[in-house]
Image (cartoon, helix red, strand yellow):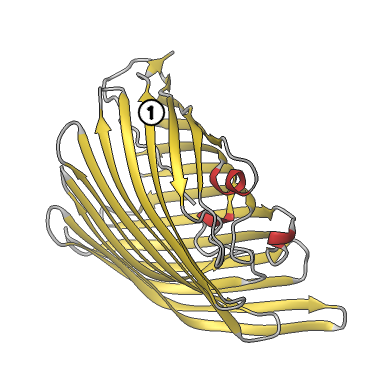
Amino acid sequence: MMITVSSVSTNRQAFAGPLSTQPLIGVAAEYASNPELAASNPRSETHGALLVDLPVNYDVDDVHISLIPRVRYGGAAGYSAVTSNYYHLDASAQFANELGSLSFTGALYRDSSLLYAGELANGIGVRRDTSAEEVNWQRSLTERAQVQLDVSTARTLYAQNTGSTNLVDYRYSSVSPSFAYSVSERDTLRVLGGASRYNSLNHLTSSDSVNVQLGFDRRLSEPWTLTTAAGYSKSTDRYRYFFGNIDSTQKGVLYSVNLVRQAESLTVSATASRALAPTGFAFVSRQDNVKALANYNSSERWTFGAGITWSNITDPLIAGGSTQRRFYSGDLSAIWHWTEQWMLTFHVTKIGQKIQQPSINATSNGVSLEISRQFHRTNQ
């Protein structure tokens, strides 16, 4: 499978009108050696796709509102159309002042479960429909102290076919408060909490989770920043059946470590984390993730990128015990700014998965070439 990412170059001129748009249109040619990630008898595919981004923004004083439709439509039918095409709509509204901010975000997505590391049914991706809402509130109590509250909910529906019989539709809601205190110009201490509820929409399974973490952030130097957090979590999983309930518990350590280098020409980030996350496999799953990204602007015309993701996912089973899935992806890219508005993007990718039950081990290699045009920003 090939995932194409459009790169947008923003025109930074000053505009008077509060309503603006800056569309992008592109076409892509793609090849994948094993888009179905089949463990045996893989079949390669070559096809094209049309990409369209139509962002609309409204900015006035301390108010920012945006609506971003994004579409990728390929010329393939069957499996590739399901796993490669997407229809995304993001909306947000932010109200800010010198003391803090309040933001509302919403999203409607139709894409593939393969885009979400590890959400593979019987080894392949299936269509995934997601609706999500989130409210985020931040406020500065003093020059050094800040509080934040994040409330979100999301519903996920999967295509019902022979490939998705072990994926279950679900709703996931969470509340996450935090407190941050700057002990110096370089160091910040944080206290983070969280509570969440996972419900399968067939009303057979659920997970109630709580966690508390302590965080420490440090500005190592002008370009380097380190962000860390670690704590304890507990999740109670419940399976409902005709004669009663079966309860089980997941306990353990959560953590995240993020190192970022932000410079004019080179940006690098590396992240390692463990978290409880919702999937379509009956309960929340423990996910260990490692990610590394790099982006290098060698000149005004050339930009190079690299990224790798590795995930080890542990799924609790209804009858007790657990099963494991591993997923990884790597990407190398080169972007040539032909003119101020025209861009050529070349990608080389490799993805793979290893599933414990049923036993599946498969990889896929891919290449893509994209030509896109970024239109000038227009205001009204």
Quadrant in which residue 18 is drawn: top left
Q: Position of residue 267 (x, y in %)?
A: 22, 50
Residue shown at 55%/36% (left/top)?
Answer: 74
Looking at the rendered structure, the kind of residue marked 1 is Ser
Where does the image place residue 279, in percent across and percent down from the top left? 59, 64
Residue visible at 63% across and 54% down in the picture: 126
Q: Tell me what residue is drawn at x 58 percent, y 63 percent.
A: 120
Find residue 150 and report its horizontal and vertical position in percent. 49, 55
Q: Is residue 161 above or below residue 216?
A: above
For numbered disc 1, what is the local secondary structure? strand
Q: Is residue 250 above or below residue 351?
A: below
One can see residue 243 in this view = yes
Indicate the quadrant where residue 186 lies.
bottom left
Q: Residue furthest top?
A: 380
State the residue lying farthest toward the left.
221
* 284 or 142, nearer to the observer: 284
Image side of residue 125 versus residue 292, left or right: right
Above or below residue 79? Residue 15 is: above
Where does the C terminus fall, quadrant-wise?
A: top left
In the image, is 150 to the left or to the right of 10? Answer: right
In the figure, 8 relative to 159: above or below?
above
Q: Residue furthest front?
A: 41
Taking the image as drawn, is residue 3 in sight? no
Q: Which residue is mark 1?
A: 372
Q: How packed is label 1: few (under 14 Cα within 10 Å), some, or many (20 or more)?
A: many
